[in-house]
Structure formats: structure tokens, C-alpha cells
Amino acid sequence: MTDSATPSAAGDRPVPLVEFHDVTVAYGRRPVLWNVDLVIDAPCLFGIIGPNGAGKSTLLKAALGLVPLVGGRVRFAGEPLARARHTIGYVPQRESVDWDFPVSAFDVVLMGTYGRLGWFRRPGPAERASARDCLARVGLADVADRQIGRLSGGQQQRVFLARALAQEAAIYLLDEPMAGVDARSQEQIFDVLASLRAAGRLVVVVHHDLRTAAEWFDRVALIDMRLVAAGPTATVLTPDNLRRTYSGQVELLREVGLAVAERGRTS
Amino acid sequence: MSGGLPCSAALVAAASGLSASPGATVIGMAVPGVPYNTLVVACGVAAVGCAAGVVGSLALLRKRPLVGDAAAHATLAGVAGAFLLTGRRDLVSLLTGALVAALVGLGALVLVRRVTRTRDDAATAIVIGGGFGLGIALVSGITARGIPGGGGLEHFLLGHAAALTADDARLLMAVSAAAIALVVLALKEFTLVAFDASFAAATGWPVVLLDQALVTLVAVMVVVGLPAAGAVLVTALIVIPPVAARQWTDRVGTLVALAGGCGAAAALAGVIVTSTRPGLPTGPVIVLAAACFCLVSVVASPRRGWLGRTLRNAAERRAWAAGLLLDTCLRASERGDGTFTVADVTDGRTARAAWRMLEHEGLVERLHGRTADGSVPRDAWRLSGRGLDRARQRRRRAADWAAAFDRAPAAARERFSLELPECAIATDADATRAT
Amino acid sequence: MADTAGGMHLWAIATASVVAAACALVGTLLVVRRQSLLGDAIGHAVLPGIALAVLAGARPGGVAVFGAAVACALVTVGLVQSLRAVAGLAEDAGAGVVFTSLFAAGVVIVTLGGSRIDLDASCVLYGILEMVPFDTVPVGGVEVPRGFASSAAVLAALVAVAVPTWKLQVFSAFDPDGARAAGVPVAAVTTGLLAATAVATVAGFEVVGAVLVVALLVVPAAAAELLVHRLHRVALLAVAFAVGGAIVGYLLAYRWNTSAGGVIAVVLVAEYVVAALLAPEDGCVAQVAGRIRFAWRVAREDRLAAVWRAMEHRGTPAGPRSALEHLAGWWLRVRGRIVGAASLSAAGRREAEMVVRSHRLWEAWLGRHADLPLDHLHPPAEWVEHHLGEAARRRIEAELEHGRGDPHGREIPPEA
């Protein structure tokens, strides 16, 4: 009933697209995510839901190696991150972008092609065409040359989505793409994500809104400093599970986390 | 006793260093027949200025413009230490000592951050105090003991380009060229990390390595800039030209190129001015030249400068006021017989300036004939044909905007574009573009 | 007394101490507000003001010079803020542009002013502590060095202003928005600190020169912060460090025949390094000791728990997994906690049971509240068991259903 599979008869199961095995993540020395076991088998629209500060973004960042793992491992189609990076597209949270940076929307999307180019090579006509195409797919073809600080919030989010599209990945990881975006832009973004799923890609989205989560995602995982439940949306989003996620049973986890950081005992 | 250097003796040391170096005086640069040596020195210093500006642009984009400050102050200890240890005063030995000290200073910064609670800015001050203090103690001790050859060390405080030989200048040129080449080669990598380090890390770029490379480049620039600008002011060479260049462009490549040019020009200006006035250290003059460029850029740049922005704001305000006035005229002409006086529609100085715009565009015309009841108000005006068209288009556009805003505010903002001031009537082209 | 060599030294030391105390006092607030950079900037930026004032005929060390310095400091801050408003420049970049330009202008003025100015570019960089005893003014009938008199006046003024306004400064430093909401005139407090920095900087010129003033301001306070935590204690300790560093630095510089300013700065940094190493909680030595203590405790507990489990299932204990655990096992035998091959004394049993209890409680909690398969519960519990104290155990037990064992069905030992 959950996606955290106990090893069954080996050999039959296909290699999962994304596998978190007993992942524990800490900031400094303080654990913020405890022993997460999560497997995503097939391409779908997968949501990661939970209250604020629950570690949802941390889970994505740990998968991408942006935050070190204290325990466990993450595999993409059986491969470690170093070998699988070229198959992963990433849309980070928007808060820490410098809007005064001297780049246009087109420049930002072009950065998505840099991973393919490698060291010291300049982007060529193929990369530029790909960047223009991705901008058109998110509906921003006419503002391509505008400096990014002069775009609206929804447009800025779509620029970063276009950058991930330009990475031409098999797995897309998006961190709160709908935060601070107006409803119409949210619909546009969701349409792009649905088209990705239709094209056979896995799209994992950290999302904050329960209502739209129930509508949009095929499968969800409920996270609150540990994995509460994971599986098909209807099965997982039950009142009992939601209560266990959102009613804050994590005080103990926070206390113990602090004790671990201090190398002491919670007395 | 004399626990320190009597101040006048320092000036004497500087002056003697000046007259002793061959080919040092640079007089009449523009005159052909200038000695080859002095040309080479000038080119060397200009190359250093250019490279410092180029590397500084990356530091500015990465939001760490002062990363070289601690290293720069520490180089003094390195220069003095190298002299004491090896007894040699050629530029290569001294600058090697400076590089070692710069890297030690940067390492100390990292260590303090990792191991203690001390904040970053305090850590920088500590490294500055330790490194520069040690340097001052060593230099002062060397000069007080009258160790031969020690007098030239003082030049590394505030810079003294005239003490450079042609060979020295060629070395500086080579290092500067290598630094510029590296930046140009890896520009896309540095820009990516500066703009979005977490995306860069997620896509597999070695962010830490690139940051360390940038800091090392800055340290090398600091060392290379020592002879011209001195330990105290060399960070200004790295900070000021990119700030000036940023005011003129919104593209990274142009920013880097302009910063290099500004740095080169400032360095050259410094060399030329100090050639006419021996006794003036080079560093402060170069910095003042760069600061002048910066001031001019900040004030007068058309894109981001204060002057350009003020003028643009004024123009937009006028266009807006003219649009409002046009609407007022339309409403006035829909009442009564279609005519109105200037006093009817204007009120205050701004409106009268706007009226002059309407007049100038030919959107209003004075009435010359008689009205229906036979009387002719002397100052009757009405909207011309063109004015009527324009006014009606404007009204339609405003209604469209209001309706779209009611339905979906954010989308409306996007559709009607952040560029076009709402309902301005600057030109016919604007009016047709708006419909 | 001013005529003898010893008298000269005493006056120089006294001046250096007074100046160091004044700078350390102001510097404490700068460090706490993360404005060390501002101290550096003002130290450089006041030079043109001082040079112009002296050129215009003011006496070095007179009130006009201090006033010019304060004016320069205000101009600096104003320029940095307008650069941010007009050019969108971040504060550190703006400060870098402004203070280097002003310092360069100051050096040029001093050099061009030549003999008309009683300053010298080198003096600005080195400080002129050695010259201080020779320039005296009569004060109450006694010939006192002018430098000492003006510095003492600066210190007295700063203390007189700081003591009554200390609470306001502390409040604005830690919570500017809260202070503003509570009616504290935060802008005035900030400007006051700025002016105090400028005044202390001018005094600092004479001792260490313009570039090293930042060391006098920041380093003693940074060292003091590592050792004490209440802000007024930090200030007092910073002053003590500063004065001590000034005295030792001057004497060493005399011994080694070199610039006093440089040596004083180096001594202050040495004080910082010692503080960083030896600080009781945060110092390097303390951190390393803490890590060793923790590793030792974990090794002990692992050994005891292994023996206890062996007693529970009547087998042999698992072997030690590391050299440290080996050592811990030997030590436990020596202390009598472990008896024979596989049994424990009463005290050892108590300690072991608490470890196993923590382990199984955590397994039970994870099994209940986290979506983990059974075989994944042991490793996290192995790790967390060393971090749970009595209160945490009671809380976990309260959140579980009473009477059940751990997820493997084993009994959970009760609280001792």
C-alpha cells in the first residue's frame, strides 16, 4: 500500500527511477530529515507535501547533493548522482535570485544547456535554438531579451522552468514552483508539467497547497521531518495520515535533533 | 631609542629610490622619441589595471567585491619577509613572497570562519591587522636598521610605478594577459556560478573549485598590482572599475570588457600624472582617476545613471500628464458645443506644460469661426481630428485595461506590458501599438 | 619627569593605552553590529578631512580636526547610501568604492601639501607614537604631551556618553526594528556611534596609523567576545585586552627597534589567537576535548549494551568494532563494570539497560510514526541511543502504547 517497498522477489522488479534509501539529512550537525525510505518506480506527476519547515525542500536538495547526507543513499535508475546528473533537471526556489544581475531571460534559459557543453565551450546555434524553443514552450518568446528584473513574478518562474526544460532531462525536480505565482501562471506551469508527464518524464514537485495537490498529482509523499506515508494520491491523503503529518508530532524529533547537534543528552 | 622611522627620512628614501632607477622619469608621453623603457612600463601598468578590472567584475557579480582586501594587506608582510629571508630585492622574489602571504591570509580567513564564532567582517579585520601590522613592523625594522636595499620596500605601501624596470613590466604584462585569458575562457562557468550557485551545483559544476579559482585570481591580481598601487589601495583597482562599468550595460560580456578598459585607463592616467610630479605615490592617483570615472558613470550614464533616470522619469511624467489632459479635453468637448477654453481644462503648472505638448502635437486647435449663436469666445479651443482619434483610442484602451484588471490583475499587468507607461500619448505609434 | 628617557616612554605608553581603551570601547559595538567594515572604512575615509583641516591652519589634535573627521564620516555614510539608492550598489561594494577614493584623496592632499602640513604620508601609515612625548602643552602647570591630553579627553568624553546610553546602543544593535517600535531613536543612536568611531579613529591615527586603526577597533572586541557573553563584560574585557596589547606592543617595539604601531597590532592578533584556542566553550581546545569525551562515552555505551544483549539471549557478546571500543571494554573491566566474559556488575547493568532502553524506545517510535520497513529501524536507533536522556525517554514512552515491546517483539527495559 505504500511506495516504500520491502525487498520482494529480486530480479523481477525494474530498477526504480528514484530511490531514497534510509536518507537522513542534517544542517550542520542537527538532523532535519530522519530515515526517509522512498521509491518512485514509474514516470508520473509526483508531489511532496507537508507543513512548512518539514524538510520537503531538504529532501530534494539532498537528492541533488546540495546538502550532505548523514546517512543512507539516493539512486537514480540505480546510478549514483555523479553518473546520473545529466538526466536530472532542477528548478530551485526563487527566493535567493539576484534580480539585478545583468542577464536576460534568454541568457538564463541558455544556462540550462551548459551542462551538455562541458568546460570552456561556448553555446552554439543548436543550443541557442533549443533555448528559444523552451522559452516558446512556456509562452515567453516575446520577452526573451528582457533583463530578468523587469519580468513579473509568474514570468520569472516560467523562465526558470524553461531553463530546466533546456536541460532535456528524464527526471525533473521542482522546488515550490507555484509559490508566489498568480493563478493563471500556475495553470500554465501545470500544463507544461503535464505535457512532460505525457512525454514519459518523471516530474517530482515540492508543493505547499493541499487542495491543488489532490487535483494535480498522481502520487504523493507526506513528509514531516520523516516520511509519514507515500503512494497514490487518493490512498495517501486520508484524514488519519494528514493528521499525523500536520498536527506536529515532530517536537520530539526537533528536541532529539538538537541533542544530536550538541552531542549531549536531552535530560 | 627611535622606536620607529622618523617621517622625513621616509620621504628621502622614496626620493632617492626615484632618482636611482634607470629610465624612470616619464616625461611627455605623447611626444615621439619617448624612451622604450618607459613605454613598456606604462603598458605593463595598463595591463595590470585592465586585468584587475576584468577579475574584479567577476568578484562583483559573485557579490564578494572585497574578497581581496585581507589578502592585499597581508602581502606587505610577504614582501618584507621575502626580502629578509632571501636578501634579494628583485621583483620576482618580492612578489612571490607577497603571493605566499596573500594565500596564507586567505587560508587564515577560512580557518577563522570554520573554527570560531567570529563573524566574517571581524575575521577580515583580524587578518588585516595581523598581516599589515606584521608587514609594517618588518619594513620599519628593516629601514631603522639601515639594511641596504631595504628602502625600496616602502614603495609597496602606496605604489611607485616609476621604480619598475622594463623586465618587471613585461612580467606583469604576461601575468595579466594570462589572467584575462583565463577569465575569457571560463566566462560562462564563472557567470553561471555567480548567478545561481545552487543550480550550478545541482547540474554538476564544481562550485567550490570555481570559487577558489576566483579567489586565487583575485589574490594574483592583488600581488601583480602591488608595484603600481601599493598594498593599501590595490583592492580599489579591483572594486572601482567594475562598479563604473556596471552603470553602462546589462550584459556580462560588455561589463567585463568595459571594466578592463576603465582599469587600464585609470592605471595609465596614474602613471602619466605621477611622472610629472615625482614624490607623489602612484597608487592614490590611479584610484582617484578610477573614482572619477565611477562618479561620471553613476551620474551621467543614460541607462542606469542618475541623470538619465531623472530625465526619463520627467519625460514619462509629462507624457502621462498629457494623456490625462487629453481625456479632460475630450470630456469637455462632449459637454456643450465642443469648445473649451484653456482655463477650463488646465489647472496648475504641470497641466500647462502638458497643454503645450498637445498644442505642439497638433491635437488641439484654436477656433476661428463663429459659433451657433453668433458669439465667438476669443480663446475657444477644440480637439482636432487627430486629437479626437487619439483621445478616443486612449479611452478605449483605459477601459480595456480596467476590464482586464477586474478579471485577472496579474495577467493584465503582463499583457499591457511593464514598459509602456499607462495611457501615455507620446506618439501615434504608441497609440496604435496599444490597440 | 618628561625630560628623562623613562619619562618619554611612560608618556608614550600612557597615550597608547588611553587610545586603545577608547577604540576598544567603540569597537565592541561595531563588532556586535557586524559593522567592522565600517570601522575600517571610517579609519581610511577621515584622512582628507583631517588633511584639509590641518592645511587650513587647525592644530593637529585640536577640536577642529575632530570635527572635520566626524564630518568626513558622515559624508562617507551618506555617499554609500546614495550609491545604493542611485546605482543599486550593495553596501560593501559601495563602501569599498567610497573609502578607498577618500583615502587616496587624503594621501594626495597630504603629499601635495608638503611642509605646510604637519602630517606625512608615512606617518599616516605608521603612526607617530614615538613623537608624542615631544609635543607638549601646559595643563594645570604641568607639561603634558598634547597627544595624551587630547586622547584622554576623547576617552573621557566617550565614557561619559557611553555609560548613560549603553542600554540604547545594545537594544539598537540586537533588534533595530524592535528598538524603533519601542521608541528608541535608532537613527540618532547610529549616528552617535558613527561620530564616536570617527573621533576614536583620529585618536588612533597617532598610535597605529590610519590603516591599522581597524585592528585597534575590532581585534580586542573579537577576542573578548569569544570569552564572555554579556555585552558590557565584552566591552570591559576588550578594553583590558587593548590596553595590555598596547603596553606589551610598545615595549616589544622598543626592544626590537621597529614601529610601535605594527607590533601593537600583531600583539592584539596574538591575543585573539590565544583566546580562540583556549576559550572555555568555543575554543579549539575545548571543542577537541568535547569530541574526545563524546567518542569515549559512545564506545563505553556500545560495549555495555553489547554485553547486556549477550546476557539477554545467553550468547557471546559482539566483538568491539573499533580500537576505541576495545580500549573502552578494557577500561570497563578495570572499573569492574564488566565482570568475566559476558556479565555486568549492578552499576554496569543499570547503565547498559538505559542504553538498550533508549535504543528500543526509538525503534518503537520510528516504527509507529515513520514509514520505515522493519529491518531499517536498527541503524538509526544505534545512532540516536546515545543522545536520549531520561526526560526524552519518558516522552517517547508516553507517545507509545504502554505494554508493547519494540517492533521486533523484545521487551523494553524499564526506567532505572
Image (cartoon, coloured by chain):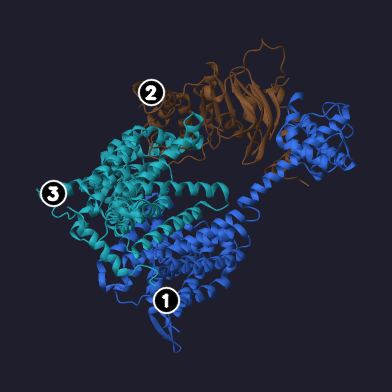
| Disc 2 and disc 3 in contact, CB within 8 angstroms | no
Chain coloured blue: C
Query: Compared to B11, does C307 lie above or below?
Result: above
Using the image, name the chain to which the residue with label 2 belongs. A
Residue C308, given in percent of the width and then of the height, sits at: 85, 33
Give the CA separation, mark 3 to mark 1.
49 Å
Q: Which residue is mark 3?
A: B35
Using the image, name the chain to which the residue with label 1 belongs. C
Residue B398, given in percent of the width and then of the height, sits at: 40, 39
Kindly indicate whether the residues beneath marks 1 and 2 are on one polypeptide chain.
no
Look at label 3 and name its amino acid.
Answer: Pro
Looking at this view, is C336 or B247 the one in front?
Answer: C336
Can residue B336 be spotted in the picture? no
Q: Which residue is mark 2?
A: A127
Quadrant location of the C terminus of chain C?
A: top right
Going by the image, does B397 lie left or right of B280?
Answer: right
Q: Which residue is mark 1?
A: C147
Kindly indicate whether the residues beneath marks 3 and 1 are on one polypeptide chain.
no
Give the CA separation, mark 1 to mark 2.
68 Å
Which residue: 84% across, 31% down? C309
Say which quarter of the image contains residue C255. Answer: bottom left
Chain coloured cyan: B
Residue B111, disc = none
Can residue C278 be spotted in the picture? yes
Q: Chain A is shown in which shade?
A: brown
| Disc 1 and disc 2 in contact, CB within 8 angstroms | no
Secondary structure state at the residue bearing disc 3? loop
